[in-house]
Image (cartoon, coloured by chain):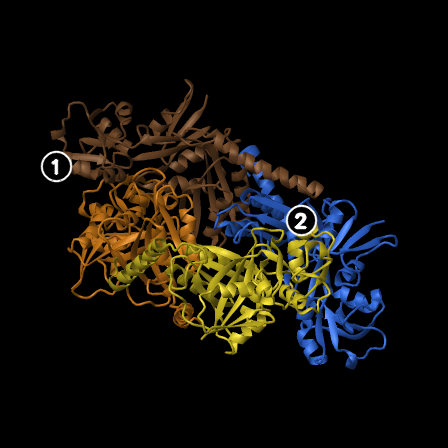
Chain colours: A brown, B orange, C yellow, D blue
Amino acid sequence: MTTYAYFGPAGTFTEAATRSLPLGADDELVPLATVPHALAAVREGRADRAVVPIENSVEGGVPATLDDLASGTPLVILREVLVNVRFALLVRPGTTLADVRRIGTHPHGEAQCRRWLAEHVPQAAYVATSSTAAAAAALAAGTATYDAAISAPIAAQTYGLETLAEGVGDNPDGVTRFVLVSRPVPPPLPTGADRTTLVLSMRHDHPGALLQILDELAVRGVNLSRIESRPTGERLGDYLFSVDCDGHVDDANVGEALMGLRRVCADVRYLGSYPKAGQVPADRERAVADARFRDSAAWLARIRESGTA
Amino acid sequence: MTTYAYFGPAGTFTEAATRSLPLGADDELVPLATVPHALAAVREGRADRAVVPIENSVEGGVPATLDDLASGTPLVILREVLVNVRFALLVRPGTTLADVRRIGTHPHGEAQCRRWLAEHVPQAAYVATSSTAAAAAALAAGTATYDAAISAPIAAQTYGLETLAEGVGDNPDGVTRFVLVSRPVPPPLPTGADRTTLVLSMRHDHPGALLQILDELAVRGVNLSRIESRPTGERLGDYLFSVDCDGHVDDANVGEALMGLRRVCADVRYLGSYPKAGQVPADRERAVADARFRDSAAWLARIRESGTA
Amino acid sequence: MTTYAYFGPAGTFTEAATRSLPLGADDELVPLATVPHALAAVREGRADRAVVPIENSVEGGVPATLDDLASGTPLVILREVLVNVRFALLVRPGTTLADVRRIGTHPHGEAQCRRWLAEHVPQAAYVATSSTAAAAAALAAGTATYDAAISAPIAAQTYGLETLAEGVGDNPDGVTRFVLVSRPVPPPLPTGADRTTLVLSMRHDHPGALLQILDELAVRGVNLSRIESRPTGERLGDYLFSVDCDGHVDDANVGEALMGLRRVCADVRYLGSYPKAGQVPADRERAVADARFRDSAAWLARIRESGTA
Amino acid sequence: MTTYAYFGPAGTFTEAATRSLPLGADDELVPLATVPHALAAVREGRADRAVVPIENSVEGGVPATLDDLASGTPLVILREVLVNVRFALLVRPGTTLADVRRIGTHPHGEAQCRRWLAEHVPQAAYVATSSTAAAAAALAAGTATYDAAISAPIAAQTYGLETLAEGVGDNPDGVTRFVLVSRPVPPPLPTGADRTTLVLSMRHDHPGALLQILDELAVRGVNLSRIESRPTGERLGDYLFSVDCDGHVDDANVGEALMGLRRVCADVRYLGSYPKAGQVPADRERAVADARFRDSAAWLARIRESGTA
């Protein structure tokens, strides 16, 4: 039995992401109020795994997740899941679109559906709620001051509401990347299409540090697929960098690059190597790159031993 | 008479930032509901200037501002203002701390004050509002379902409330950087301690692009003080980079670096050169750097003309 | 009337290179004993031009030329000439190959023909002379202690000797590059296939200096076609770099790169921009590169003037 | 008993360099006519070691040595020796300075002493010989057409001549670096002040190759102390690079850099790691650098094993 803490409440895209995992019949899903709560549950042993959003194709990195993973007791990412972000307009059974006068949702949900709402429900006013699922929950409970909720589609089942409209949202291609987080364990086996997530802290007052970091990766042929600066919270202009690299910690080139980063950064936090969602493994390419590194290591060993290759 | 649109409502830190500018007696301040609304007012000529938050020492870059400035009709930043982010706990006259059962604020405000609230008002439940000022406004109007609001200190005057506690917040050193935005105009004169803000778009599938960008800056001795990737909204992994450089577009080294970026990037959007808030101008250093560039240009001109320097 | 000083004596490959230039009927050719003598003649006004070897496909750079051009009164290269280095075995009329017991030539000539000599004249001993032409001259004058000379083919005419064998040498593809040197004058017009020759002095104790130099070129897309370290003569490990770049000082990218080098090097000596021998001009490519630089300069000018591009 | 082949004849600076080694009573010194002959003797087992000049503070790299070591059966450098290059003016007993009418020496010797000769023996003409020692030998044998020789000081003893002047030469600080060469053997133990010599072949038509090479070194903090391009002899513009790096092949950073070079170069030829002549070992610095590499390797191993450092 595995316990999954997820960034709740129930009825959110995060729950949808969690349910897309290969769950066992006995597995337990526990919605927690915030990303830090979900991650703390894993850190403290109250849950085995956490599922939290890390990056959104419209909003960018999710600060709460990036910042929480970057500090505190180490955690690692085991897996990533992509979910299309299309909302649903939910109502209590019997309500029609014409009846909708006020719509409840989280400010972010409102921001992502503004054009859709202006076009399809122009008469409706907006009421802020603490989450998109909370909007659905209060509506179902009869405590809401509004008569429709903008929520994740999954909230309809969770709270017994009716779906008045699907595919709600201004950006039809919005995707959110969620990660499955665990206490440190050895990484899953390399697949040839892996991602490695890191948090890099610079030494203070080191203007060329970012260039140096990118060079450590480039020299080893490691591609950087995401980089985000995050404030350290100490003062404006102090940053951590949250980065994703292509490749696996067990790959020779990624390993050598990590050692290089370790030497030039004030701190390197390893957040896991895991298969890229939706990518065909490229075993051959990985094998070729690894072979080049193995070949050069064997060549060096021969020279060190005998003075010639 | 100048009209300032700012990210409202009234009674926020953005209003405080706006009021810290050297305003004229006739100047008009217009709160608008969102950052995009405030910037649109300038773009469309309904306002002369907009004041919006761009970066926070705890949360990082403000996505709404970064993304809105990065697209649409060009705008430029004329000036920056730093504001300490310390909240106030506001109540209607007569309410004491012991009376407070429910506290209204924006989810972000709640996030930034969570530890403070747990310590000082442990009995109070949290009610989400659409902004920290909206919390104060509803409280003042008597329509709130809570009896205290977490808002910017300025909201007390704006809405006629009493300040029960000042300096509220979990991060006493939190600072937000606001920018004063205009339709394109020539930049203010260089001061020797300037900042230049840019948005850089990469060509697709160009893994070393970021390294190349940093190299264009480094070769000209231009320091990068902030870099943030922002999704283009098209697909996960497509990024723009929002960057701040030290220096002014009229500086020789910054100018040459900008031309280099223009050649290697798919697009470079210039968002203004303006004095760094809270920094002593370093005219001499700037003069020295400019002199080195002028000297090398004169040297090249002599060679081209006469074959010798 | 133009006076050409060349690295003599008469009858060398350098004379052959000089005679391959478009000479006027009145032009005068003056052989001088050493490369420094030929260059000094131009510096001091006793000659208008000098022709000296600069690089050999087998031996590499010619130290005497590289070092002399690198110091003293500035000179510039106007043109380059490629000459195939195939020696001739010269004798006084009547001598047959079987008669040859001793062969005179410069030690370098001997080094380049050693295998040929072992195969074709195995019985012959070697006698050192101060130049390959001096070998021919003494042979012609009857003062030689040998009965054949290894010289440039042109020496047969110069000294009235007979050519016993042509195409002598161990490396049939050997080529020497000669340069036509002048007191400083504006460079010839760009052709689209030009070369620019420079001497770069590093600041002392600056380990990354060479990397920085290459980066100044790479960032502007300027290709380095030759680089040679030359000792400064001061102590082991102090170097100048003699370099050739593709492109012309009037090209926008070369110009900007030169200014960058001027800023990072202790000294940059410009030794001329001139057409590459044996290369088809690539006007269109040059025009494209220049257009990109002009476009970025115009773009910057618009921003500086109006705040937008 | 060890047999040392050296670039002869007897009585040269190379013999002086050889005699400065810690020789055993039984060791045999064999002068050979050229650098290639001396190296071939080691390659073919006729000698155990060869001593050849590799670099001169005035003339630069010695092409014959650089080119011969760069090809053929691999050899390694075990040691380097520095010799001050001050010539002596040698005569047969009884000859005075006033008697000297003609002076014999190698053209290079003449070039390095020209100013000295003009000042001290202005009346003397110059006669070319095949080496500076050959000048002394012929003088001693009575077969010379000159009455003084410019040779290495050691030639006086070798040939039984008198030293008329010491310290002859235009560059009083001239130093030549000689290397002791062997068939491949494991390198001597690191001393903390070592040098590693390499020959790097570029892939064809790879304009940024040199930049890439320097970057492989720079990223590992390996300093490049000498770099010389040498023509491959195939066509103008095809180069090998002969380089010296600070550090020892057994040093962690040098080892990693070598593996990187091996991956980006068409070929890397290792020519040995050996103590720098005249340098105080810096064991502590080397230990610190190695410790940083070991620390990062241990850190990576922990992550690979357990998912956390």
Q: How many marks do you count on the picture?
A: 2
* Residue type at tag 2: Leu
Of residues B262 and D125, the one nearer the viewer is D125
List x then y, in percent, for residue B250. Answer: 33, 65
* Residue type at tag 1: Gln
Q: Which mark is residue D271?
A: 2
Q: Is residue D20 left or right of residue A292?
A: right
Q: Are marks 1 and 2 on the same chain?
A: no
Of residues A242 and D212, the one nearer the viewer is D212
Alpha carbon separation for disc pair 1 and 2: 82 Å
Q: Quadrant of residue A151?
A: top left
Q: Is residue C99 left or right of residue B200?
A: right
Query: Dot 2 falls on which chain?
Result: D
Of residues D128 and A159, the one nearer the viewer is D128
Residue C136 visible in image? yes
Query: Dot 1 falls on which chain?
Result: A
Q: Are marks 1 and 2 in contact (CB under 8 Å)?
A: no
Which image quarter is the C terminus of chain C in?
Answer: bottom left
Q: Which mark is residue A123?
A: 1
Element assignment for label 2: strand
List x then y, in percent, for residue A11. Answer: 30, 28
List x then y, in percent, for residue D264. Answer: 54, 44
Q: Is residue D214 left or right of residue A82?
A: right
Nearer to us of marks 1 and 2 is 2
Element assignment for label 1: loop
B182 is higher (above) or lower (below) than A253: below
B91 is higher (above) or lower (below) than B257: above
Of residues B289 and B87, the one nearer the viewer is B289
Seen as rendered, the residue at the extreme right is D25
